[in-house]
Image (cartoon, rainbow, N blue to C red):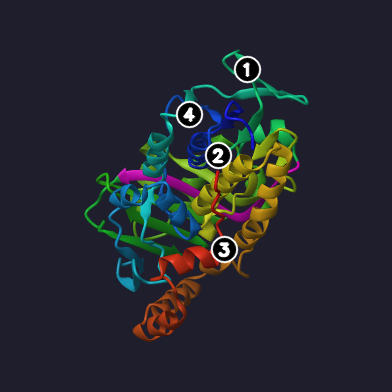
Amino acid sequence: MPTAATKILISGASIAGPMLAFWLSKYGFDVTVVERAASLRLGGQNIDVNGPARKIIRMMGLEETVRAANTTEIGTQFVNADNEAEATFSKDDPNGLTQELEILRGDLVSILYEASRDKADYRFDDYITGLTQDTNGVDVTFNSGKTERFELVIAADGIRSRTRKLMVGDEPMFNYLGLCTAYLTIPKGPTDTNWARWYTADDRRVILLRPDNKGTTRASFNFLLPQDEYDKLTPADYKPLLKEKIQNAGWEAPRLAREFDTNDDIYFDGVGQIKAPNWSNGRLALTGDAAYCPAPVTGKGTTLAMVGAYVLAGELATHAHYQDAFASYEKRLRPYVESVQKLPPGVPWIVYPKSKLGVFVLNKAFAVAASDAVKKLIGLFSKKDDKHAEEEAEFDLPEYTV
């Protein structure tokens, strides 16, 4: 087992980074977390803590804290242009978007930070600009001009990780799925309720409005865009493209169009997966979205980030040599990552119809899925009410004795 003096640097203070910091500190490592932003990035949309991630949260003693930060969302309604619900899935429905532990991304980041900050050294407003490793450690250069030596460095800083490029070059591939998304927080309106509302428009567009526990509404606008058009985009193109794509979409589209004009906090990106052939290079390693982002369409991005960080920490704590720990981390986790990243045929295109007829057919399909008869049939095979069965069936989470 490594000694307690082992110094580890983590790049990124979102979800995977603080989760990794918590467990490494618990195992006696000397942990530093560096974050490019001046403070925690607390924005973002609704996410859920499900499957094996829920077991990890329970092991950390944080399950009730996460539960108390619930977004207030009670389920999902698929609505038409007149805001009439075509299909309704409550939080208890296995086919619904809303999970039991539904939480804002920023709230989860804050909870994990508070749980790890006393034992880990967090450094904000700085980032890694250079890495030079040798047989005994890694010399790290920071944007602030400081240099420091660590024994291991781990990138946990997201799908667009610059640290990853310093570690493994251009080996990891961003597999664009043909879908673009924009996230933003908007004032709560008179039509907003405690239901998430999903609206499908023609021309391959979807608007999703979800309640939060802050008195505002979390909005997303999603649309299909061919690879060649996506590849040409620059940041200057984002707002004009959003305003163009939202035109004549119906429903709450005018409301979002006004926000695109005035809201300065819009997150825009292409949706895709990170496929990395190797998750480590010597004393350098990857975790979370930097290593294996599965894309939001899987609903497993948060779970994968948390599970990966937990497993990486446990392997480092139970192996005498980091090389063996990194190898075991990848051997344990890669099959799970590959299963999560494997998308069903037609995803995401199947829920982005081109014509108004296609929208009509899709809404009717949602209505059938939401019918009592289908729900009863699904209930015969669903284990959603058995939390422990769900956690164990999805991934055999190791319990590390240190």
Amino acid type, label 3: Pro
Q: Main secondary structure of the magenta part?
A: strand
Residue 237, which numbered label?
Answer: 2
Residue 120, which numbered label?
Answer: 4
Q: Which residue is mark 1?
A: 148
Residue projecting furthest to the top = 145
Please name whichever residue, 156 or 344, is drawn nearer the observer in this view of the structure.
Answer: 156
Q: Earlier in the sequence, mark 3 or mark 4?
A: 4
Measure the C-alpha gap from mark 4 to mark 2. Answer: 40 Å
Q: Which residue is mark 3?
A: 348
- Horizontal arrangement in the rendering, residue 325 relative to residue 65 (left or right): right
Please name whichever residue, 271 or 263, is drawn nearer the observer in this view of the structure.
Answer: 271
Q: Earlier in the sequence, mark 2 or mark 1?
A: 1
Q: Earlier in the sequence, mark 2 or mark 3?
A: 2
Measure the C-alpha gap from mark 2 to mark 1. Answer: 39 Å
Decide: is 367 above or below 233: below
Q: Are marks 4 and 2 in contact (CB under 8 Å)?
A: no
Q: Which residues are magenta?
A: 171-186
> At x 58% / y 48%, what residue is drawn?
311
- Horizontal arrangement in the rendering, residue 62 relative to residue 233 (left or right): left
Q: Secondary structure at mark 4?
A: loop
Q: Residues within 10 Å of mark 3 (few under 14, many from 20)?
A: some
Q: Is residue 380 visible?
A: yes
Measure the C-alpha gap from mark 2 to mark 3. Answer: 23 Å
Decide: is 284 above or below 358: above
Measure the C-alpha gap from mark 1 to mark 4. Answer: 16 Å
